[in-house]
Amino acid sequence: MKKTELIQKSYEIAKERYAALGIDTEAALKRLQKIAISIHCWQADDVTGFENLNNVGGGGIQATGNYPGKARNIDEIRSDIEKVLTLIAGKHRLNLHETYGEFGDKVIDRDEVEPEHFTSWMQWAKEKDLKLDFNSTSFGHPKSGDLTLANPDKAIRDFWIEHTKRCRIISEEMGKFQNDPCIMNLWIHDGSKDLTVNRYKYRQILEQSLDEIFATEYKHMKDCLESKLFGIALESYTVGSHDFYLGYGAKKQKIVTLDTGHFHLSENVADKISSLLLFTPEIMLHVSRPIRWDSDHVVILNDDICELAKEIVRADALNRVNVGLDFFDASINRIGAYVIGIRATQKAFLQALLEPLAKLREYEGNGQYFERLALLEESKGLPWNAVWDYFCLINDIAVGEDYIAEVQQYEKSVTSKR
Ligand code: RNT
Ligand code: ZN
């Protein structure tokens, strides 16, 4: 039997199997098709960017590995992303950092960046039918130090306030241009390597800086704030902790970003979805895979991500949760890394959309807890993968492991020559 035929037949059988449980696979496919994933640009080049500044490390993030073929300029990043898009289904978004502007040979410091540095990105994104999201960038700069927006030194603080204000203006322009709000994420590494006796003071300064940054309201962009547990060389204290941004977000109605690598490893990030939905306007996700720490491994289909997707679907919150990715593995083929991570995220959402929720809730309502647990267990083994293969088929992209050969081919003809 031809592979296409096999996939179609398997799907028909799966469809019936699901229908018996009251699940409409066609409806699930339609909903999955609409989930736009905000693809982070920084997996393509290990968070390097295109600044012509004398960049320094710092900021507590680090890509590990030196697999050959990383993108070295804007054209290469775009080409790589275009390749990735041919291997995934659906319409998506691209998440840019400020350091990825088109600066040419010019030295543009972070407090000088303008929307014009992103004009070509906006045009390219339009041609590729992508929407853009944005991030301010306070790491990897001579003024990054240990403290940026929370720095008691007014000159340094003002530099980063100016940077972040400009990033909001750029986001606003992007949102206007694409006729869809641009989501701007604000993550700063601010913290302390060793014990500090000024926890309150730095957080108070950060609150004031944020108030100043957010004083202007925009129509075409949305702000989100990303916390972190700790960074390398900043292990003892993080100014922008989860409590801090949760409080700020609830008070000021700002979006809180949940990076799945930014919590204690035994903490259940999925459990935070329903609480945030009650008190903040939307949620931004940075789906990542922490191994022992915030290691930013490529996302795979594991229990954590499945639970996260299920909590979003169970809360009927697909329209209030912005799904973004955040991983950067420089030890394997970078295009392949994207494809694995994006597909894994989509698979998790598909599984969530195929959950026999009505029946599960009926059991729960009746106090039938054995039945609830049994059905939860059994639903793990339902033929979701036949629906997934069919999703790839109808989207005219490589089914199953077929994308491996396509990534290898691109490596052979493009990235290995860099
Ligand atoms: C760092 C944060 C942040 C970055 C990107 C590059 O720990 O997760 O989101 O990964 O801004
Ligand atoms: Zn993140």
Image: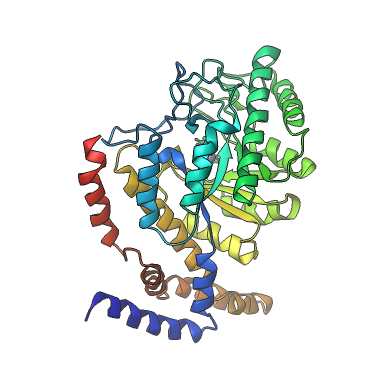
Q: Is residue 333 above or below residue 47?
A: below
Residue 22, image quadrant? bottom right
Give percent across and percent down for residue 151. Answer: 66, 18
> Which residue is located at x 64 percent, y 15 percent?
156
> Which residue is located at x 53 percent, y 49 percent?
324
Give percent across and percent down for residue 54. Answer: 45, 16
Residue 382, image quadrant? bottom left
Number of marks in the rendered image: 0
In front: 319, or 216?
216
Q: Quadrant of the C terminus?
A: top left
Q: Is residue 416 left or right of residue 94?
A: left
Q: Quadrant of the N terminus?
A: bottom left
| Residue 285 seen by the camera | yes
Residue 256, image quadrant? top right
Q: Is residue 366 above or below residue 34?
A: below
In front: 264, or 253?
253
Q: Is residue 397 left or right of residue 56?
A: left
| Residue 328 seen by the camera | no
Give percent across and percent down for residue 43. Answer: 41, 40
Give percent across and percent down for residue 273. Answer: 64, 54
> Which residue is located at x 28 percent, y 37 percent?
69
Q: Is residue 299 above or below residue 314?
A: above
Q: Is residue 357 above or below residue 232?
A: below
> Which residue is located at x 42 percent, y 62 percent?
89
In front: 76, or 314?
76
User: How is colour applied across the structure in the image?
Assistant: rainbow
